[in-house]
Image: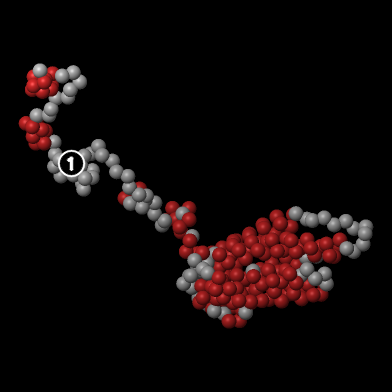
Amino acid sequence: MDNSITNSPTSYLLGSVPAVVTEERSTINNKVPRANLQTFPPNNNGKRDPSYQTFTSPNEGDGGQSSSGYNGVFSISSYTQYFNVDTDVVMNRLMSSLFPFNGDFFQKIDANPDLYGLIWISTTLVFVIASLGNCTTYLIHGKGDGSTTWAFDVSYINMAASSIYGYVVVVPLGFYFLLQYLGSKASLVHFWCLWGYSLFTFVLTSFLLVIPVAFLQWTFTLISGVTSASFLALNLRSYIEVNDLTIVVASAIILQMGLAIFIKMWFFS
């Protein structure tokens, strides 16, 4: 009884799985190529399956966006080179703006002009003149007599932002187009960098303008205006290759002195 059960074919038993025939296995192996884990996707006799799609990185193929041309204007990577400065470089350029008679600012920024100074110096100047201007009006008018009431003027911030940001963007842009018209090779980024650092002397002078003495205020204003205007004029003369620089230098001096007087009259009077 035990022998008959043992010798009976297992394919007739309930729930059994028939054994795979060796001939069928060899036939399958002849028809289907053996999978190779080192080759992916699988090839069909050296030809790639057209239905298979691959995913490429954005920098590969035609799908990548180039940072040149008009696409570079909207690419953040195009502007990273103008912020590649450290503390020592920024401090060196700030000190150059306070000593304008060196006249070597364009030599320092020739290989690496930055927009870091333009953004942070102008932003610092906006908040400094807006806050210290309110302090000055308090010292002048608020503590004069008991009948005068003083209130913080929020409009100082709006006026400071619109005037300072507008000045450091529009004025260098105007000089750039003017020099292009005169036939000189000018760099807009170099001009923005130059005008940005020229505002640093106004940041320091703003703390001195808090002193509620008219004579001292006008003295500090004229000194800062002359220092900043000299910084612009001397560096423009050494950088621009134009025979007649009178109109360019005179315009820079007048505009810079006008900005100094505007800050004094609007925020510290």
Quarter-of-image position of residue 234: bottom right
**In the orientation shown, which residue stands out farthest toward the front?**
1
Q: Position of residue 176 (x, y in %)?
A: 54, 66
Where 15 falls versus 66 (above or below)? above
**Circle 1 SS class:** loop
Q: Residue at x 80, y 71 (%)?
A: 211
Q: Residue 135, relative to residue 71: is it above or below?
A: below
Specify the amino acid type for callout 1. Ala
Q: Quadrant of residue 262?
A: bottom right
Classify 10 Å Cα crowding around label 1: few (below 14), some (14-19), many (20 and above). few
Q: Tell me residue 164's x, y (percent).
A: 66, 62
What residue is shown at x 85% (from left), y 65% (from top)?
A: 140
Depth check: 218 or 237 in front? 218
The residue drawn where x is 68% and y is 68% is 203
Residue 43 occupies quadrant:
top left
Is 53 left or right of 31, judged from the image as shown? right
Against 72, residue 185 (above or below) is below
What residue is shown at x 18% (from left), y 18% (from top)?
14
Q: Nearer the viewer, residue 102 or 130?
A: 130
Quarter occupied by the N terminus = top left
Image location of residue 160, percent across then percent down: 70, 59
* 71 vs 187, nearest the viewer: 71
Q: Position of residue 147 (x, y in %)?
A: 93, 57
Q: Which residue is mark 1?
A: 35
